[in-house]
Amino acid sequence: MTLGKNLTVSMILGLLTLIPLAYAALPDIEAAVMNKDYAQARDLASKIIKDSNDPAQRTEAQYYYGLAQLRLGQYSQARSAFQSVMDTHPAHDVYDKAALSLIEGFYMEGLYTDALDTAKQLLKKSPYSSFLSLIYFKIAGADLKLMRWEDANKYLNKIINEFPKSPEVQVAKQLLEEKQYFAVQVGAFLDKGRALSLIDDLKGNGQYAYVVETTASDGQKYYRVRVGQMSSLESAEDLKKRLDKLGYPTLIYP
C-alpha cells in the first residue's frame, strides 16, 4: 500500500513537472532576449513551437524565434518566422509586430525596396495601428536609403506633427535637420574627447572624419563620428566595406 501510494505521488509530481514546461518557457524567452542571449531564446522558442498544443503560444514563440534569428544575423530564417506569424492571422498588434520585424529584417540585409513595399502594405492593412509612428519611421528610413528624400521628409513630418511624444520624434527631427547625403558612422559617444580621439585615429588611416552633435529625447548629448559625405548609397557601402576592413564598427547614415 505504501509503495503504491509513493508511486502514485511520484507519478502526479512528474506530471505536474511536465505540464508547466511549455508555459514557463515564454517568460524565459523574453528574459533571454532582454539579456541578449539570442541563441538561448532561439532554442527555447524552438521547443515551444515543437511541443506546445496551444496555437496562440506557438505563434508567440514563432515571433520570438524570428526575433532571435534576426539578432543572430540569420535573416532568411527570421523572415520566414515572421511571415509564418503573419500567416496565422493573429491579433492586430501581434500581426503588426511581426510585420515590423519583417521590415527590419529586409532593412538590415540592405533590401530597402522590399522593406519599403512591406511597410506600405502594413500601413494599408493597419492604418490605425498602435505602432503607426514606427510604421511611418520604417517607411521614411527605407525612403532615405533609396534617396527618395521628399517622400522620407513627408513621413518624418507626419511623425513630428501627429506623434509629438513618440520615441521616434527626436530622431525624425534630427533627420530633417541634416543634409541629404550618405555618411558612414563609426561611433557615438557621450564624451566629446573620445569622439575627437577617434577622428584623429581615422585621419591617421587616411579617412576624412567629423563630429555631428545630437541631442536625445532625454536631453543627453551624443557626439557621433562620421566619415564621408556621399550622394549615393553605393559609394557609402563601398566606404563601409573599407572601414570594416580597418576594424571600425560601421553604420550607414541615414
Image: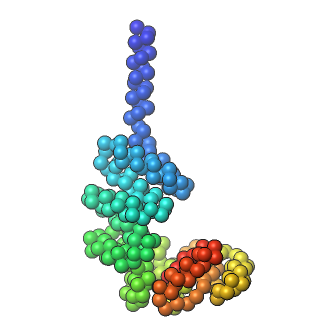
Q: Residue at x 31, y 45 (%)?
A: 54
Choose between 238 and 89: the one closer to the eye.
238
Residue 235 pos. (x, y %): 51, 87
Query: Coloured how?
Result: rainbow
Residue 87 pos. (x, y %): 27, 60
Q: Residue at x 43, y 26 (%)?
A: 13
Vertical order, 18 against 34 (above or below): above
Which image quadrant for residue 137?
A: bottom left
Residue 102 pos. (x, y %): 37, 67
Could you tell me if residue 86 is visible in this image?
yes
Choose between 198 and 170: the one closer to the eye.
198
Q: Residue at x 52, y 79 (%)?
A: 252
- Quadrant, the N terminus: top left
Q: Residue at x 71, y 81 (%)?
A: 201
Which image quadrant for residue 35?
A: bottom right
Choose between 49 and 132: the one closer to the eye.
49
Left or right of 100? Residue 126 is: left
Residue 238 pos. (x, y %): 52, 83
Left or right of 203? Residue 5 is: left
Q: How many marks?
A: 0
Left or right of 253? Residue 146 is: left
Could you tell me if residue 219 is visible in this image?
no
Vertical order, 67 against 229 (above or below): above
